[in-house]
């Protein structure tokens, strides 16, 4: 059936270091930690558009560091 999606698990994590006395905060993060390749949404267009299916997927694994100061 075209309007059903398989189930999937999405694992995201953030570790935050907060130093309020210094006005500083840092974060380590990972999104889609298991690097799943899944379809998150899809739909079929109408006859006027050619009856093709649009598919949306989960972004690949991303990780990084974010830091900032409060003044």
Image (tube, rainbow, N blue to C red):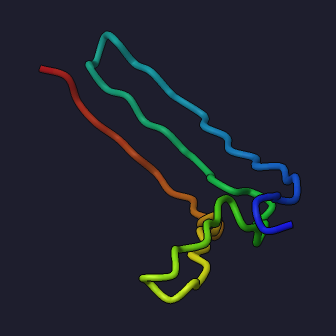
Please count the marks in the image. 0
In what quadrant of the picture does the C terminus appear?
top left
Q: Give the residue furthest to the front.
A: 47
Residue at x 53%, y 29% (from the top left corner): 16
Q: Is residue 9 above or below residue 68?
A: below
Tell me where residue 51 appears, x and y as whole percent: 57, 84
Return the residue nearer the eye: 70 or 11.
11
Return the residue nearer the eye: 4 or 7.
4
Q: Is residue 23 above or below residue 44?
A: above
Tell me where residue 24 appears, x and y as whole percent: 31, 26
Tell me where residue 26 appears, x and y as whole percent: 42, 36
In what quadrant of the picture does the N terminus appear?
bottom right
Return the residue nearer the eye: 27 or 6.
6
In this rendering, position of residue 60 left or right of residue 50 = right
Residue at x 60%, y 34% (from the top left corner): 15
In this rendering, position of residue 68 left or right of residue 50 = left
């Amino acid at each position: 059936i075209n309007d059903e999606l398989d189930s999937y698990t999405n694992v995201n994590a953030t570790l935050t270091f907060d130093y309020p006395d210094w006005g500083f905060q840092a974060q380590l993060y990972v999104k889609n930690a298991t690097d799943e390749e899944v379809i998150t949404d899809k739909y079929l267009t109408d006859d006027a558009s050619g009856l093709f299916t649009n598919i949306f997927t989960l972004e690949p694994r991303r990780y990084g560091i974010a830091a900032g100061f409060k003044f």
